């Protein structure tokens, strides 16, 4: 049996199978995760920015005894 014939048969069988998730379903799942990550980053942007600014200002005004 030639290896490329075997691989071709396996690829056709994989593409015909209707069980399991399809690429479209995975794409929708990934899009949902990206939306949640972007929303979380947008929600944390201002508090994190002010926290870093406060820390930087505190460190910048520290005087050695």
Image (tube, rainbow, N blue to C red):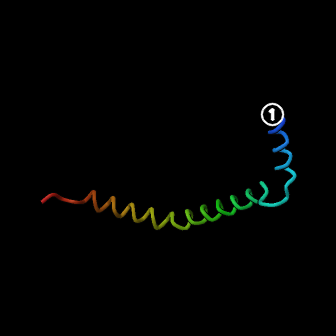
Front residue of 50 and 4:
4
Question: Which of the image's four quarters has the C terminus?
Answer: bottom left
Residue 7 picture quarter: top right
Residue 51 x %, y %: 40, 65
Question: The N terminus lies in which quarter of the figure?
Answer: top right
Is disc 1 placed on a helix, strand or loop? helix
Tally of marks? 1
Image side of residue 57 versus residue 43, left or right: left
**In the image, residue 58 lies at what x, y percent?**
29, 62
Q: Name the one closer to the observer, 8 or 27.
A: 8
Question: In the current view of this chain or complex, which residue is farthest to the left?
Answer: 65
Residue lying furthest front: 1
Task: Residue 27: name its quadrant.
Answer: bottom right
Instruction: Identify the residue shown where x is 61% and y is 65%.
Output: 39
Q: Residue at x 82, y 50 (%)?
A: 14
Residue at 81%, 44% (x, y): give it.
Answer: 10
Task: Pinpoint residue 56: horizontal percent, then vertical percent.
Answer: 33, 58
Residue at the spot of label 1: 4
Task: Please identify the quarter of the rendering in which residue 28 is found.
Answer: bottom right
Q: Nearer the viewer, residue 34 or 15?
A: 15
Q: Residues within 10 Å of mark 1 (few under 14, many from 20)?
A: few
Out of 39 and 26, give the one closest to the viewer: 26
Residue at 68 percent across and 58 percent down: it is: 30
């Amino acid at each position: 049996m030639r290896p490329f014939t075997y691989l071709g048969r396996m690829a056709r069988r994989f593409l015909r199978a209707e069980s399991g998730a399809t690429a479209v379903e995975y794409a929708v799942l990934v899009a949902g995760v990206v939306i949640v990550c972007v929303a979380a980053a947008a929600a944390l942007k201002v508090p994190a920015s002010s926290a870093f600014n406060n820390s930087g200002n505190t460190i910048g005004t520290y005087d050695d005894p």
